[in-house]
Amino acid sequence: MGREKRRHQSPDDSRRDFLKTAGMAAGATLMGGSLWANGRPELVANPQFAAFPRIQNDWMMTPDQIRNWAYLKSQWGPTWAGGVGWQQFTNFLIEQIPERGGIDLDTVDIPYKHYIVDDWPDPSTHRYGSGVEVLNLVSGGVPVPVVASYGETSGFTPPEGITAPMLYYDFANPPGDEQIAGKILVVPPLPYPDPPYTDAFLGPYAMNDYEFRSPGKWYPMYEPVPASVASSYHSRWCWMQSMEAAGIAMKGHAAGMVVVYDLSPGAAFGLTQRALYTTKGKAIGGNVPGKDFIYVNCPTLCLDRVNGAKVLDNAKAGKSATLTLRARFQDDMSKAFVCYLPGKHYGTPLDEQIMLATHTDAMSLVEEVGGLGMLAVMSYFNHIPRAERPRTLAFYFDGRHFMPGGESAWAAYDYYLPHPERLKPIVATIGMEHMGGRQTVETGPGGNEYRYSDELPENGGVITSFIDLYNNNIWLIETLAKAVTDNHWPRVDAKSGFQRAPEMPEAGNLREQNSIPATIENYQPGVNGGFQGQVYSPMNKGRMFHIPGIGLAADWPGAWTQTYSQIDTEAGPSGFDADYFMRQIGGLSQMTGEFMIVKPVVIDLGWGDLKSAIIKLADSDFVTRHHAAEQRQRLVDQYVAAFRKVEAASLPEARSTLKELAANVSSWVARDKQDSLSALVDGQISKLS
């Protein structure tokens, strides 16, 4: 709890006071009237649009329809790009698109080397002595009963496996490359770093501050979330550990590797290790294009804490092991495709578009259900006649998410990079992934009982819908809050923070790699005045293309990066909650409708940049320090007043207020901060002509 206290203490307490005031102001605005109609009377006059923002349930797909789709997708199993399940899933999506009004389908082919382990659909392939196993481990002459998973792209062994001495990786005294060479490196669970925690740790492994959060029970901020509350945080830590360990094993020329997770048998089983075994020497892709990857053969198996305990003891004793991983690389073809639900100006220079994006490749149902979400949104808006749709909806189904290295390694195949002209009409973006999942927990003796949470959805019984806000624009935050409230979306945590990955050292000490601070570009502190981490939502394409938008990336992995987690999961039957899925779709559909009519100047990214610059002014940034709190609040008030005028389309008044703000900046703010802030103000004034 000491960490939380430190996070909220600051010599500039007045900045924190504003954040709370702003939050109350937002609530007053929401209660005072419809944001939909604010400044847009011409739309309210149209009966069609009067009902447009508040979701009409008779236009929505039903939970039963979604449940049937989810069941069908589960039968196809993992949808690895180019694989059989992926082909069935994408064929289904493409067949459904015209039935829901989508037109002008266009595709991009993405050739790649597909790493395949034939363990679907039979979990017995992970069990020693089943007669069908494709991966197994014999440690010190004793078979390991169950191997949880394997290192993706880690390579393969001969049918009889490889036999070599095991080498225990000691975090306190890491072995050198010469010790690792030719051995089977055994990596024990990586402990959490000691507090005080860095922001790089707090972002993905603890709850932290936010721009908006739905009502309910939440674990205290800035402390690691126990697996008994939500397994996803700790599971994510273990999942990331394996990727860094791969770099160490490759650099040391290990014969193979075994990673032991601090996870229950259920949580670890089928947990896909998203590592990248390439000659770059790290288990990350960096700037190396995927087509240029040269893979290193370092066959890797992953174990849970129960099946791994004896293996760790044997490795400490230097005993030998035989590791078997039957796998192969295969030339396959992924693809991305784009289609459109046309608006009234589609095909003309007047057309404006909202881009909705998801990925089509992954291993489990909830991880890879965004495509069904896209169809549900398309179906909803197809009820509105084309002539009455103010903007076109562009649906981007990406196929690179779980290709080796992810989207960044295959950037040359992004649909919009060779078609930059098709970005020009896009005014906002929405991303969606990881939908409809129930939260899993680890309880019981030793934390080895893996099951679903007993909490109500609003208290964490479902995986949290993390929302990436790009950026902290007042309209965007308030409009999302309204969409969440209107649609009874039970579990939402929305953030505008952005975090650049830390520069990692060459593969060496795992503990060292996890203690390096990341570069934090926090647009502003959260509503409690503290650090707000980043929502990792690569489907929010707006961040890549500098277009305003939001991205839903609900919590993971916690059953949702496990091969056998389809309708049923290792935590039990019925892991997919179709009612929760439809609450998410209701909120996203309402946001889509809002984006279809909001004026671009209202959601311009410059408003968030200016807001952050003002709020983050320290007392020492003012000419007269003892007036800093009062003057900062005055600048904030002027900013909000100007923004409200823009929302109401009163642009001359907004310009006038911004000019007053600029004059006060010139008088009150110190010279070394004044120029950059004045440039932001002038930039917004220039957009109000």
Image (cartoon, grey):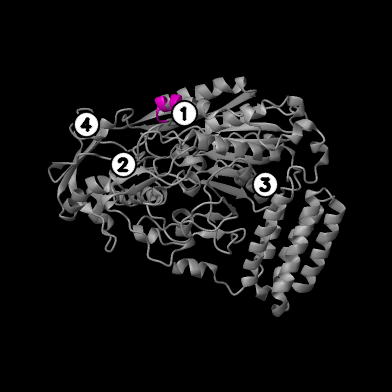
Q: CA distance from mark 4 to mark 3?
A: 58 Å
Identify the image quadrant of the N terminus: bottom left
Mark carried by residue 159: 4
| Amino acid at pointer 4 | Pro
**x, y percentage for residue 154?**
33, 40
- The mark that comes first in sequence, 2 or 3, is 2
- The mark that comes first in sequence, 3 or 1, is 1
Q: CA distance from mark 4 to mark 1?
A: 36 Å
Q: Is residue 343 left or right of residue 290?
A: right
Report the span colored magenta.
70-78
Mark 4 or mark 1, which is nearer to you? 1
Which residue was labeled with disc 1? 70
Label 1: element kind? helix
Q: CA distance from mark 2 to mark 4?
A: 27 Å
Image quadrant where residue 118 sits: top left
Q: Is residue 89 left or right of residue 688?
A: left
| Amino acid at pointer 1 | Ala
- The mark that comes first in sequence, 2 or 1, is 1
Q: CA distance from mark 2 to mark 1?
A: 22 Å
